[in-house]
Amino acid sequence: MSTSPLRLALASALFGLQLGAQAATQSPQVVTFDTTPRAGQHQRQTIDMQMTMKTRLEAGPAATDEQRAKIAQAAENMARTGPVKMTMKMAQTTQVGQPDAEGWLPLTVSSAAQGGQIEVGGRTMPMPPQANVNLAFTARFNPKDFSFDLQQSQGAEFNELMRAQGQAMVNEALQVAKALGQRSMKPGDSIEVPMNMALPVPIPGGAGKLDAKLRYTLNRVDRGVAHFDLSMTMQMALDAPLPAAAASEASAAPAAPQTLNMQMNGSGTGTSSLRLSDRLPLASQLAMDVKMDMQGPDNGRMFMDMQMQMKAKGESLAKPAAAPAKKKS
């Protein structure tokens, strides 16, 4: 099973919306949790991801002797290869324009890969070119009722299914922002942000769901910057019917329809710092441990342990307001 770079980008964008939670100051030590896009914002987040994946195979209880032999050979080859290590760097830019006559704010979001590498069996190689990880879309947002309208998109895989799912994912993030917009915090206070959504599965009959929770604890407010401690839990389930050719690959006779089942659980901790004056996420880091259990068509099971480190650094690209011209004496 392969992971679409676009789906990774969409998921990263949504996590970025949550990890980049912005705050507005009320007093030197009290902040309001506010993630609402504002006119004139122009920000870039540079995201570094490092993953180490250890995988093993086992035969299921219903496996035939032939299947067990094939799975044992594959498991031996996998053990010799050792862990797979991957690094990837992405940049995500968000720009918010000025409101139109009805109050809608234009949004432009772009995401682009900035290189990476894979290490397999002690050999390091550049990440294969993935043009379809680069995507951009324009949309509009109404801060009055938090309506969101995805207008145009660019990306090799951005078909109608991904378009609908992408809009649903952003809508989910904006509804969270709406619910939390009036929530005040002082040092020591915590707030939990849910992230529950259907996942795009481009296979007829496929279904997937992500249930995750981010917990923020305000550590301190120092020189106009709010510092948070983060914790996260995640559960993901995916079911997809396999093509007939894959399902009956091990047998000449037609096989009954089979389904690919995947369960993933993870947890992690990290920190985030946010500049209050312009709602800029200055830096975030999150370390996660993820375990996956996947059952395939050949009565085999694949188990994966993944350690993942995500770091993000933010910068404001907005031009400073021009100083008023001095009056001539």
Image (cartoon, rainbow, N blue to C red):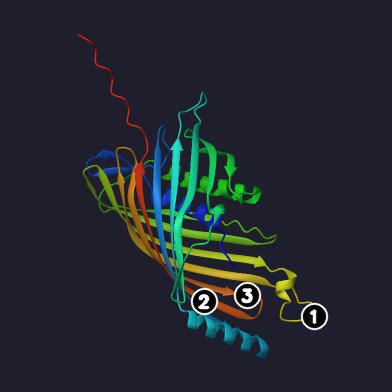
Mark 3 = which residue? 296
The disc at residue 302 is: none
Between 187 and 277, which is closer to the camera in this rendering? Answer: 277
Residue 88 horizontal side relative to residue 221, left or right: right
Residue 52 at x, y percent in the picture: 43, 70
Q: Which amino acid does label 3 sit on?
A: Gly
Residue 201 at x, y percent in the picture: 62, 59
Q: What element carries label 3?
A: loop
In the rendered image, the residue lying farthest to the top is 329
Indicate whether 98 appears above or below 252: above
Q: Is residue 64 visible?
A: no
| Identity of the residue drawn at 52% across and 60% down | 210
Mark 1 = which residue? 253
In the rendered image, the residue lying farthest to the right is 253
Q: Quadrant of residue 74?
A: bottom right
Disc nearer the start of the sequence (1/2): 1
Residue 141 at x, y percent in the picture: 51, 36
Q: In which quarter of the image is the N terminus?
A: bottom right
Q: What residue type is labelled 1?
A: Ala
Q: In which quarter of the image is residue 72?
A: bottom right
Mark 2 = which residue? 303
| Identity of the residue drawn at 55% across and 77% down | 302
Residue 262 at x, y percent in the picture: 57, 70
